[in-house]
Amino acid sequence: MATQSLTTTSFVRDWAEFEEKLQWLHSQVSSDHPVLEEPIFRGQGNAEWKLTTTLERFADTERNRTALSLRAYYRKITAAKRLLEGLTGKQWADVPDPLEFEDRLQQDPFRWLDLFLNKQPGIYEYLVYLRHHDFPSPLLDWTASPYVAAFFAFNAVEPGADHVCVYAFLRSRQRSVSGDPHFFTVGPYMCTDKRHYVQQCRYSMCVGRDGDDYCFRSHEDVLVNANGTQGQLFKLRMPVVERRTVLRKLELMNINEYSLFGSEDALVRTISQRECYFSDWQL
């Protein structure tokens, strides 16, 4: 069993070595180690990027730290809900208005946000919908599939990057009992956007107490204590030059932009990748 640390970084030469690492990771989750849960994965198009949510990036860009307040954020998403319901035809009837939400939060006896939200599944489902449609979100998205994570890493390589990375979070069932800050994961079953299912999504959130409110915290700061007694966060770095090889292998598994997003734009981009990137130009 690996020793606990924030990250163990491994440089992976090629796809074959990546799959060897995956085999080792899954071998850790067995009857011999019942304290571990199945790993979850996250792909990033530059190995130097930190584990940050879109809400964190928005708050840093706008220099608006108030955006990280749970109550302020909730007021924003409920303000957007009515317009979204009118234009999309979708309904989120189980998402309470801000005053009712704050009243429920104030009366919660546990003071653990994950336990509170577990009793409010409609809020989770709305948060996941917003995350999949690019509203700034406190959810950091992961996937149960290392191959989906590899696709997201290699399909969106940042210009100038030398390496992409796939994070593998091997979670312990014996979680940290620290209450501030607090880390928890969400998924897989909920009634929300279909992308959640085809991408095999999981999500994590980091929060801490801030008086009578919660404040969203950085995953980079919290994950050092979130792995439990035997879990570990791995970072697998792969060279960008492997991009075409990896994307072609994933295409053979039917893992591409169209299969993961299902939109017309994604269909055209998937076809253009097949014709212009995977194939030569001799027609």
Image: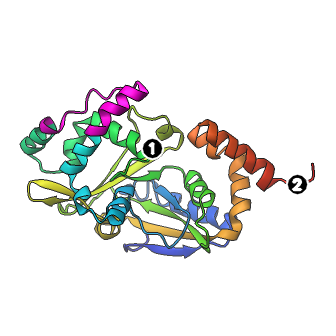
The residue identified by callout 1 is 132
Mark 2 residue element = loop
- Tell me which residue sits at (57%, 51%) in the image: 148
> Residue 221 placed where, x, y %?
30, 70
The N terminus: image quadrant: bottom left
Q: Is residue 79 above or below residue 139?
A: above
Confirm whether residue 227 shows in the render: no
Does residue 238 appear to the left or right of 71 in the view shown?
right
- Tell me which residue sits at (61%, 68%) in the image: 159
The stretch drawn in magenta includes residue 96 = yes
- Tell me which residue sits at (45%, 53%) in the image: 142
The residue identified by callout 2 is 281
- Tell me which residue sits at (34%, 37%) in the image: 126
Residue segment shown in magenta: 79-100
Q: Is residue 223 above or below residue 125?
A: below
> Residue 174 placed where, x, y %?
28, 58
Q: As rendered, which of 8 and 108 lies closer to the eye?
A: 108
Identify residue type, mark 1: His
Identify residue type, mark 2: Trp
User: Mark 2 vs mark 1: which is more N-terminal?
Assistant: 1
> Residue 72 placed where, x, y %?
20, 50
